[in-house]
């Protein structure tokens, strides 16, 4: 796809050694055409896999089977995710909450002003969210 500028593996399959086999295959993708890439992926059978409010979130998650694409057009978000993946892999961080905390710290260091909890806790009457899904939906 010509809309993909960079694509790298992330998530527990990439980070944890030995890699778990019962988890998604996560990829972080940096694109120059956010909406166009999402439309292309929909044509290929991918579906939105999150309840994110796209005007507040620097990414969109698209899923097909066990493949999860984390798509962003924010270079700092992409670079922070790659750096956090590298650190977590080097340290072999197996605990999901520890990985989430590390990712948030690194993203803030890269200037990403975003807290995934804010997105999930956002009060919307047209799309009520259950915050208990938080730990199961985060792709790292």
Image (cartoon, rainbow, N blue to C red):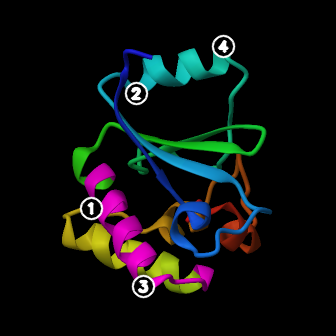
| The stretch drawn in magenta includes residue 89 | yes
The residue wearing badge 1 is: 112
- Observer-nearest residue: 101 or 51? 101
Q: Residues within 10 Å of mark 3 (few under 14, many from 20)?
A: few
Q: Earlier in the sequence, mark 2 or mark 4?
A: 2
Tell me: residue 53, above or below residue 133: above
**Residue 42 horizontal side relative to residue 8, left or right:** right
> Where is residue 105 drawn, in percent x and y?
32, 78
The residue wearing badge 3 is: 91
> Where is residue 98 drawn, in percent x and y?
52, 86
Residue at coordinates 67% horizontally, 42% vertically from top-left? Answer: 67
Magenta span of residues: 78-96
Gap in Å between the C-alphas at discs 4 and 1?
30 Å
- Element assignment for label 2: helix
Q: Earlier in the sequence, mark 4 or mark 1?
A: 4
Quadrant including the N terminus: top left
Residue at coordinates 37% horizontally, 15% vertically from top-left? Answer: 2
Gap in Å between the C-alphas at discs 3 and 2?
32 Å
**Marks 2 and 3: in contact by CB < 8 Å?**
no
User: Would you say the magenta stretch is mainly helix, strand or loop?
Assistant: helix
Residue at coordinates 61% horizontally, 62% vertically from top-left? Answer: 13
Disc number lying in front (4 or 1): 4
The residue wearing badge 2 is: 34
- Element assignment for label 3: helix
Q: Residues within 10 Å of mark 4 (few under 14, many from 20)?
A: few
Disc number lying in front (3 or 4): 3
For the question of whether residue 122 can be seen, the reply is no
As drawn, the label of residue 43 is 4
Residue at coordinates 19% horizontally, 64% vertically from top-left? Answer: 111
**Marks 4 and 3: in contact by CB < 8 Å?**
no
Quadrant including the C terminus: bottom right
């Amino acid at each position: 796809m010509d809309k993909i500028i960079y694509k790298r593996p992330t998530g527990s399959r990439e980070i944890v050694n030995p890699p778990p086999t019962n988890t998604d295959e996560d990829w972080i993708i940096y694109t120059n055409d956010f909406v166009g890439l999402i439309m292309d992926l929909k044509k290929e059978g991918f579906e939105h896999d999150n309840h994110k409010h796209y005007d507040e979130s620097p990414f969109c998650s698209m899923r097909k089977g066990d493949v999860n694409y984390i798509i962003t057009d924010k270079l700092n978000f992409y670079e922070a995710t790659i750096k956090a993946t590298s650190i977590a892999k080097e340290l072999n961080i197996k605990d999901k909450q520890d990985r989430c905390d590390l990712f948030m710290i690194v993203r803030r260091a890269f200037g990403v002003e975003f807290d995934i909890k804010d997105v999930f806790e956002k009060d919307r009457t047209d799309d009520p969210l259950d915050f208990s899904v938080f730990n199961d939906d985060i792709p790292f």
